[in-house]
Image (tube, rainbow, N blue to C red):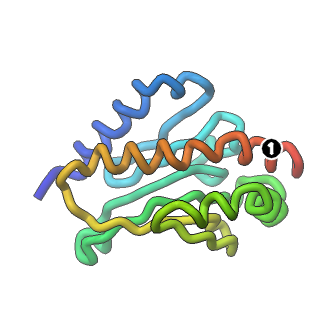
Amino acid sequence: MKDIKKVFRNLEQNLRQASWFDDGWDIYNRGPYLQLYKANWFNQNQGGVHFDTYIETPQLQKKTFPVHLHAEEDCPQQQRFIKAFLALESDRIRNWKGYSVIGEGYHICSRTLPLNFKNLEQRLLEEFNRLRQLEESIDAALNKVT
Protein backbone atom coordinates (compact mmCIF):
# COMPACT_ATOMS: atom_id res chain seq x y z
CA MET A 1 0.00 0.00 0.00
CA LYS A 2 1.40 3.33 -1.04
CA ASP A 3 1.54 6.21 1.45
CA ILE A 4 -1.35 8.50 0.41
CA LYS A 5 0.01 11.44 2.39
CA LYS A 6 3.29 11.18 0.51
CA VAL A 7 1.43 11.06 -2.81
CA PHE A 8 -0.42 14.25 -1.85
CA ARG A 9 2.80 15.94 -0.63
CA ASN A 10 4.43 15.15 -3.97
CA LEU A 11 1.34 16.37 -5.84
CA GLU A 12 1.45 19.63 -3.88
CA GLN A 13 5.13 20.05 -4.70
CA ASN A 14 4.49 19.41 -8.41
CA LEU A 15 1.59 21.88 -8.47
CA ARG A 16 3.68 24.56 -6.74
CA GLN A 17 6.43 24.07 -9.32
CA ALA A 18 4.06 24.47 -12.28
CA SER A 19 4.68 27.54 -14.43
CA TRP A 20 1.16 28.89 -13.78
CA PHE A 21 1.12 28.43 -9.98
CA ASP A 22 2.56 31.80 -8.94
CA ASP A 23 -0.41 33.57 -10.52
CA GLY A 24 -2.47 33.71 -7.29
CA TRP A 25 -2.93 29.98 -6.71
CA ASP A 26 -2.85 28.27 -3.33
CA ILE A 27 -3.16 24.76 -1.90
CA TYR A 28 -4.74 23.34 1.22
CA ASN A 29 -3.32 19.90 1.94
CA ARG A 30 -4.26 17.89 5.01
CA GLY A 31 -2.74 14.58 4.06
CA PRO A 32 -5.22 12.42 2.16
CA TYR A 33 -7.23 15.51 1.08
CA LEU A 34 -6.13 18.40 -1.15
CA GLN A 35 -7.73 21.58 -2.45
CA LEU A 36 -6.39 23.82 -5.23
CA TYR A 37 -7.82 27.34 -5.49
CA LYS A 38 -7.07 30.97 -6.27
CA ALA A 39 -6.74 33.64 -3.60
CA ASN A 40 -9.86 35.48 -4.82
CA TRP A 41 -12.14 32.42 -4.69
CA PHE A 42 -13.33 32.96 -1.08
CA ASN A 43 -11.62 29.75 0.03
CA GLN A 44 -9.51 31.04 2.92
CA ASN A 45 -11.37 28.69 5.29
CA GLN A 46 -11.66 25.87 2.72
CA GLY A 47 -15.36 26.65 2.18
CA GLY A 48 -15.31 28.67 -1.05
CA VAL A 49 -14.63 27.72 -4.67
CA HIS A 50 -11.97 25.05 -5.11
CA PHE A 51 -10.91 21.91 -6.92
CA ASP A 52 -10.42 18.98 -4.58
CA THR A 53 -9.62 15.33 -4.32
CA TYR A 54 -9.27 12.87 -1.48
CA ILE A 55 -8.32 9.28 -0.90
CA GLU A 56 -9.54 8.21 2.52
CA THR A 57 -10.85 4.90 3.91
CA PRO A 58 -14.07 4.78 1.81
CA GLN A 59 -12.11 5.46 -1.39
CA LEU A 60 -9.53 2.81 -0.49
CA GLN A 61 -12.35 0.32 0.08
CA LYS A 62 -14.14 1.18 -3.17
CA LYS A 63 -10.85 1.46 -5.10
CA THR A 64 -12.06 4.69 -6.68
CA PHE A 65 -11.62 8.35 -5.80
CA PRO A 66 -13.19 11.64 -6.92
CA VAL A 67 -11.91 14.89 -8.36
CA HIS A 68 -14.37 17.77 -7.88
CA LEU A 69 -15.07 21.42 -8.48
CA HIS A 70 -16.99 22.77 -5.50
CA ALA A 71 -18.52 26.11 -4.53
CA GLU A 72 -19.25 25.77 -0.83
CA GLU A 73 -20.98 28.01 1.72
CA ASP A 74 -18.33 30.79 1.70
CA CYS A 75 -18.90 31.38 -2.01
CA PRO A 76 -20.97 34.59 -2.33
CA GLN A 77 -24.32 34.08 -4.01
CA GLN A 78 -23.46 30.38 -4.22
CA GLN A 79 -26.36 29.22 -6.40
CA ARG A 80 -26.18 32.26 -8.67
CA PHE A 81 -22.44 31.66 -9.07
CA ILE A 82 -22.95 28.00 -9.97
CA LYS A 83 -25.63 28.88 -12.50
CA ALA A 84 -23.47 31.63 -14.07
CA PHE A 85 -20.43 29.37 -14.16
CA LEU A 86 -22.27 26.44 -15.73
CA ALA A 87 -23.75 28.73 -18.38
CA LEU A 88 -20.15 29.37 -19.44
CA GLU A 89 -18.59 25.94 -19.02
CA SER A 90 -21.09 23.06 -18.83
CA ASP A 91 -20.56 22.06 -22.48
CA ARG A 92 -16.79 21.94 -22.14
CA ILE A 93 -16.97 19.92 -18.91
CA ARG A 94 -19.41 17.43 -20.45
CA ASN A 95 -16.92 16.86 -23.27
CA TRP A 96 -14.16 15.88 -20.84
CA LYS A 97 -13.88 12.12 -20.51
CA GLY A 98 -15.52 10.86 -17.34
CA TYR A 99 -16.70 14.25 -16.04
CA SER A 100 -20.28 14.92 -15.07
CA VAL A 101 -21.93 18.26 -14.45
CA ILE A 102 -23.89 18.22 -11.20
CA GLY A 103 -24.92 21.80 -10.36
CA GLU A 104 -26.72 20.87 -7.12
CA GLY A 105 -25.82 21.94 -3.60
CA TYR A 106 -22.17 22.89 -3.70
CA HIS A 107 -21.19 20.29 -6.32
CA ILE A 108 -20.42 21.76 -9.73
CA CYS A 109 -18.73 18.87 -11.52
CA SER A 110 -16.79 15.73 -10.75
CA ARG A 111 -15.01 12.71 -12.09
CA THR A 112 -14.42 9.39 -10.38
CA LEU A 113 -11.15 7.66 -11.16
CA PRO A 114 -9.99 4.11 -10.47
CA LEU A 115 -7.60 3.95 -7.54
CA ASN A 116 -4.48 2.55 -9.12
CA PHE A 117 -1.25 3.67 -7.50
CA LYS A 118 0.71 3.41 -10.73
CA ASN A 119 1.37 6.98 -11.90
CA LEU A 120 -1.16 8.29 -9.36
CA GLU A 121 0.64 11.59 -8.78
CA GLN A 122 0.90 12.20 -12.52
CA ARG A 123 -2.78 11.36 -13.09
CA LEU A 124 -3.81 13.75 -10.31
CA LEU A 125 -1.60 16.47 -11.75
CA GLU A 126 -3.25 15.98 -15.15
CA GLU A 127 -6.73 16.29 -13.63
CA PHE A 128 -5.85 19.49 -11.78
CA ASN A 129 -4.27 20.90 -14.95
CA ARG A 130 -7.50 20.12 -16.82
CA LEU A 131 -9.68 21.74 -14.14
CA ARG A 132 -7.37 24.74 -14.01
CA GLN A 133 -8.57 25.61 -17.51
CA LEU A 134 -11.82 26.74 -15.84
CA GLU A 135 -10.02 29.57 -14.00
CA GLU A 136 -11.17 32.44 -16.25
CA SER A 137 -14.80 31.34 -16.17
CA ILE A 138 -14.73 30.92 -12.39
CA ASP A 139 -13.34 34.46 -12.11
CA ALA A 140 -15.96 35.77 -14.56
CA ALA A 141 -18.85 34.10 -12.73
CA LEU A 142 -17.59 35.38 -9.36
CA ASN A 143 -17.29 38.89 -10.79
CA LYS A 144 -20.85 38.64 -12.08
CA VAL A 145 -22.33 37.78 -8.66
CA THR A 146 -20.16 39.91 -6.33
The quadrant of the image that shows the N terminus is bottom left
Q: Nearer the viewer, residue 114 or 26?
A: 114
Mark 1 belongs to which amino acid? Ala
Q: Farthest front residue?
A: 95
What residue is disc 1 on?
Answer: 140
Position of 129 with respect to 8 (left or right) is right
Nearer to the camera, 96 or 135: 96
Q: Which sits in the foreground, 75 or 137?
A: 137
Residue 110 located left or right of residue 61: right
Percent of width and height locating residue 143: 85, 43
Q: Residue at x 69, y 63 (%)?
A: 90
In the image, residue 82 above or below residue 141: below
Q: Is residue 83 left or right of residue 54?
A: right
Mark 1 crowd level (few <14, some 14–19, many ≥20, 10 Å Cα): some
At x 35%, y 65%, the residue is 113
In the rendered image, the residue lying farthest to the left is 1
Residue 63 coordinates in the image, percent (x, y)? 25, 72
Instruction: Say which quarter of the image contains residue 102.
Output: bottom right
Residue at x-position 27% and y-position 77%:
62
User: Horizontal placement of 13 versus 75: left or right?
Assistant: left
User: Toward the viewer: 54 or 97?
Assistant: 97
Kindly identify the residue that appears in the image at 14 percent across and 53 percent down.
Answer: 2
* Helix, strand or loop for disc 1: helix
